Amino acid sequence: MAGLRRYLGVWQLPGAPTLLITGIIGRLGIGMTPLALLLVIEQVTGRYSLAAIAGGCYALAGAALSPVAGRIADRIGPTPVLIGTAVAHPLALIGLLWAARSEQAPFALVLVAAALAGASYPPLTAAIRGAWNDLTSVASGRYHLRNTALAAETTLFEVVFVLGPLLVAGFVLFADAGAALIGAAVVTLVGTVAVALGQTMRGWQRHAGEHHTRGLGPLRVPGFPALLLCVASLGIAFGAAGVTVPAFATRYTPDDPDSLAGVLLAVWGVGSAVGGFWFGIRRPARNMTRQFAWLLAAVAGSFAVFAVMPTPLALGTALVVGGATIAPALTLENTLVGRISPAGMLNEAYTWVVTMSVGASAAGGAVAGLIVDHAGGVPWAFLFAGAAVAAGAAIAALPAGPIARAEAATVRVETPAPV
């Protein structure tokens, strides 16, 4: 019961319902737009390769520009940045849909429109995670709720990747992929504006003593580049899984691999959600870096187990169990970002996490595809993903490594206040 009271305490934080519920609505586009974009371009061109190129432009432009939006949010506050991008992104999606369906528009214009749509996506995840750090700062007296708050955020964020594709499927069933793209634009606009105008974002204040970030910003903060390598290791593994699990499904149900792959990835997400909920009711570890290393090692070990699973039922069982380590690892990842990064750089720091994760996921998926097709097949692709996470675990495990030193230099709360 004490653990459940922690979640109740998070819910009662000022503005928490908006961050938790409306924040998920505003980010449904993360799960909807890439798939809807792929379907729109494929329907027009008849070629998945061209659709994939457009999707790549969307993802890479977003990854490249999000740290810029994060830095601006750190300077002037998140509300104006969120509102500006909340309006620009839907307009860019409408422009993308027009360009894709216009017989006169060259395909290069479609790629430009896709890049603009990706570049204008609101930095909502970074703003929300920065807000949780502010709400649970040491000075607020709510620091003991930070781990639970970030666990709730991480666990609920899984909903985006479950509901997003389902919503696209519903739009396609009753209308078409273009309607799904417009639907993604609407939820992004409405949800982002609601969060931006909420109590937490409007109450943002510059942290005392913080100056404008210059140059490389958080990339120069001790420990942060090493933490980004750990982020990349997880991103590589997730991207590889997105290719390897469907490849596994194709071996067993060549007539309908998509359905089996969807079920397997869904049960992986269920395991992650359960693990995240459980982790959120635990008291934070005093040595978060060491705990993070152990969790990364557990994720790496789970991929090694996936590699030897002989049947879909066996793999599904392993995915549920192994998935339970994912949300806890991501929760600690987000917590360490808040501990290591100066308060005046939080938005930009979290956008760098998103950028690194997206880029690494794309790379992991590409390498896994090559391994599946040309270098040993599904088991070796799973082992590649596990090896990537193991490298991240080794970086975090260094007792005198950069992450450990950075954490040791932060203000610690040795005994959290009673709930």
Image: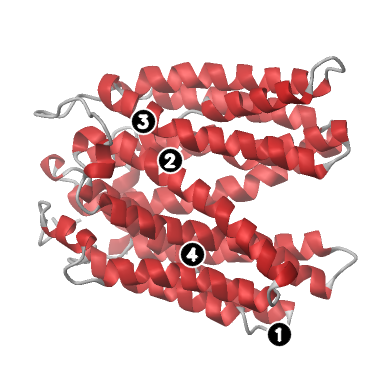
Q: What type is the residue that disc 2 sits on? A: Leu
Q: Which residue is mark 2?
A: 20
Label 4 crowd (10 A; few <14 / some 14-19 / many >=20): some
| Location of residue 255 in the rendering, given as x and y in whole percent from the top left corner | 90, 65
Q: Which residue is mark 4?
A: 274
**Left or right of 125 in this view: 183:** right
Distance CA(mark 4)–CA(mark 1) = 25 Å
Sequence order check: which comes first, mark 3 or mark 2? 2
Sequence order check: which comes first, mark 3 or mark 4? 3
Sequence order check: which comes first, mark 4 or mark 2? 2
Label 1 crowd (10 A; few <14 / some 14-19 / many >=20): few
Label 2 crowd (10 A; few <14 / some 14-19 / many >=20): some
Q: What type is the residue that disc 3 sits on? A: Gly
Q: Which residue is found at the position 33% from the left and 72% from the top?
A: 394
| Location of residue 100 in the rendering, given as x and y in whole percent from the top left corner | 78, 24
Q: What type is the residue that disc 4 sits on? A: Val
User: Mark 3 and 2 residues: CB-CB less than 8 Å, in contact?
Assistant: no
